[in-house]
Amino acid sequence: MKTDQIDNIVDALFGGNDSSAAAVDHVFSALLLAYGPAFTRSLGDAPEKEIKTFWGYQLSDFTHSLEAKRAIVWALQNLPPKVPNAIEFKLLCRNAPSKQVLALPAVVTVNPEIAAKVLEGLKSHPVAKIDHKAWAHRILADVKAGMKRSPAVVQMAKNAIGEAA
C-alpha cells in the first residue's frame, strides 16, 4: 500500500486527534473484527476501563504524529495469527517501516581555484606512517633485554607481528 493511501487511512481513523484513547478504540474495533470472540477472551476479566488505560499507555508513543499513527495502521495491516496483547501490539508498531526519506544535500558549487589550493596543500603535507604494531615490537625488545613479561603478553606480541611461538 502506498504511503498516501496509508495517510488517508490514518486521517480517516484519527483525524487530528492525538488521543491515546481514540487510538485504543480504533485498535480494539479492528482487533475485534480480525479475531472475533478470541480478542474478547484475550482481554480477560479486568474492567474494560483499566484494560483500555493500559493499552492507551502502551500506544501513547504512536499517537503524537502522522508518522507515529502510520505505525498503528501498519500494525493493523500486519497482524499475527494469534491475538496480540498490548505489549505485543506495541512491538508490532515499533517494527513498522519508517516513511522518512533521507534527503541528499543540496549541490554546492565549488570554486575550482580554492579546491586546487586545498588539494595542493594536502599533497604537500604527507601523512606520517603509523606503526600499529609498535607495542608488540617494544614488548619483544624488552624481553630480549631481559625484562620479565608474562608468557601471555609475549605470545600476544609474537602473534601480532606474525612471529612463530
Image (spheres, helix red, strand yellow):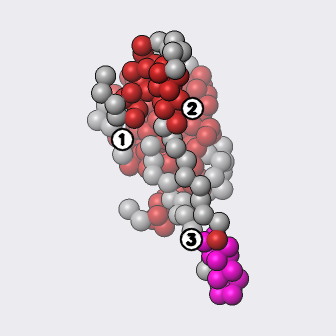
Q: Nearer the viewer, mark 2 or mark 3?
A: 3
The residue depicted at 34 percent of the width and 31 percent of the height is 163
Mark 1 vs mark 2: which is more N-terminal?
2
The residue closer to the viewer here, 48 or 124, is 124
- Classify mark 3: helix, strand or loop: loop
Main SS type for the magenta part?
Answer: helix
The crowd level at tag 3 (other Cα within 10 Å; few <14, some 14-19, many 20+) is few
Q: Which residues are magenta?
A: 110-123
Q: Which residue is mark 3?
A: 104
The residue closer to the viewer here, 130 or 140, is 140
Mark 1 vs mark 3: which is more N-terminal?
1
The image quarter in which residue 106 lies: bottom right
Q: Which residue is mark 1?
A: 79
Q: Residue 84 at what x, y percent from top left?
A: 40, 31
Q: Residue 12 at what x, y percent from top left?
A: 54, 58
Instruction: Judge whether residue 86 can be spotted in this image.
Output: no
The label number, if any, that marks residue 58 in the structure image = 2
Q: Residue furthest front?
A: 145
Magenta span has 122? yes
Mark 2 vs mark 3: which is more N-terminal?
2
